[in-house]
Image (cartoon, rainbow, N blue to C red):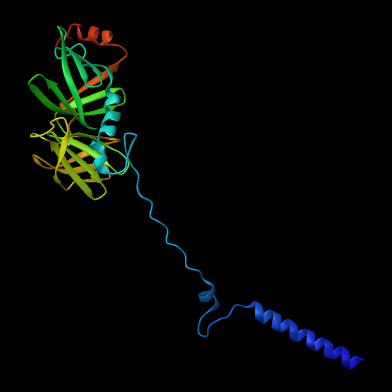
């Protein structure tokens, strides 16, 4: 009886050992268990940087000059603006889409306004046309002949001398007016070398290499060369302020 009981215990232990061995994964000689059990993992897909300029999202830097983007910037200009209140050069602008009305204190003059880039305007007055840089700063409209532009997320646009410098990462492209085609649009001139490092934008202007300070989201070449307008609630009010007598010179 005792002998039979011992034999049963031995057989039970042998079965347990075989069960444990069958549950273990096969291990090739010379390889660690971790090497056999490890499963291949997919490399994470790099996240593409989202380009955004003054709240307008872009898929690529060239989209900065496409109609939907320019239309979004044009809408920001609609309204009444006053330049140089109580001065000899005071004038009021009323912008409604492509229609620009200018009051100089004597008469209203009709112009055609085109947004060629997020920092470049074209003003047509009959046979006379000119391009000027522009930027919005709070409730102000900045217009000037010097370099003007704006910095966004992973993209910057600077306008200088009628040309537009678009920068994103290591890429910089220069656009200019199409003198022999649609003069209300821009065409690519060449790839260039411009950089946005910290708070300085460097580029090759028509006058040579330039470095312009960045102030928040704006890139301003020379504040002294700017005309600054403030937005008013009505066109009539803007005209009234133009008609105010100029302040006496000191």
Q: Nearer the viewer, residue 136 or 201?
A: 136
The image shows residue 22 at horizontal and vertical percentages of 66, 80
Q: Say above or below: 41 vs 14.
A: above
Does residue 81 lie above or below 59 as drawn? above
Q: Residue furthest right?
A: 1
- How many numbered markers are drawn? 0
- Asked if residue 42 is positioned above or below residue 129 in the image, the reply reads below
| Residue at the limit of the structure toward the bottom, as seen here | 3
**x 14%, y 14%: residue:** 89
| Residue 104 image point, x, y percent | 16, 11
Residue 182, picture quadrant: top left
Camera-side residue of 175 and 222:
175
Say which quarter of the image contains residue 90.
top left
Position of residue 115 measured from the top left corner of the image (x, y, whole percent): 21, 28
Left or right: where 237 falls relative to 222: right
- Position of the C terminus, as image quadrant, is top left
Along the horizontal axis of the image, is 83 left or right of 49?
left
Residue 177 position within the rendered picture, expressed as x and y whole percent measured from the top left: 12, 34
Quadrant of the image containing the N terminus: bottom right
**In the figure, is residue 223 to the left or right of 129?**
right
Residue farthest to the front, as pictured: 181
Q: Is residue 205 above or below residue 135?
A: below
Q: Which of 246 and 53 lies nearest the eye of the viewer? A: 53
The part of the image, by quadrant, that contains residue 224 is top left
- The structure residue drawn at horizontal position 36% and vertical position 50%, both measured from the top left corner, is 48
């Amino acid at each position: 009886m005792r002998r039979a009981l011992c034999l049963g215990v031995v057989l039970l232990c042998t079965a347990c050992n075989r069960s444990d061995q069958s549950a273990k994964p096969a291990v090739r000689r010379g390889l660690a268990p971790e090497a056999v059990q490890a499963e291949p993992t997919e490399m994470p897909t790099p996240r593409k940087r989202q380009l955004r300029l003054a709240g307008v999202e872009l898929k690529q830097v060239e989209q900065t000059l496409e109609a939907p983007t320019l239309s979004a910037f044009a809408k920001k200009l609609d309204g009444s603006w006053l330049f140089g209140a109580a001065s000899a050069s005071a004038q009021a602008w009323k912008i409604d889409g492509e229609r620009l009305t200018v009051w100089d204190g004597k008469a209203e003059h009709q112009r055609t306004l085109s947004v060629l880039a997020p920092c470049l305007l074209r003003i047509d007055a009959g046979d006379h046309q000119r391009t000027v840089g522009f930027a919005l700063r709070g409730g102000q409209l900045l217009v000037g002949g010097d370099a003007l532009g704006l910095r966004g997320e992973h993209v910057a646009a600077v306008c200088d001398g009628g040309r537009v410098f678009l920068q994103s990462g290591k890429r910089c492209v220069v656009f200019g007016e199409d003198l022999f085609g649609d003069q209300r649009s821009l065409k690519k001139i060449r790839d260039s070398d411009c950089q946005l490092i910290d708070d300085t934008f460097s580029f090759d202007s028509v006058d040579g290499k330039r470095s312009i300070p960045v102030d928040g989201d704006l890139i301003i070449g020379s504040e002294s060369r700017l005309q600054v307008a403030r937005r008013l609630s009505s066109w009539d009010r803007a005209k009234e302020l133009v008609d105010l007598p100029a302040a006496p010179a000191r």
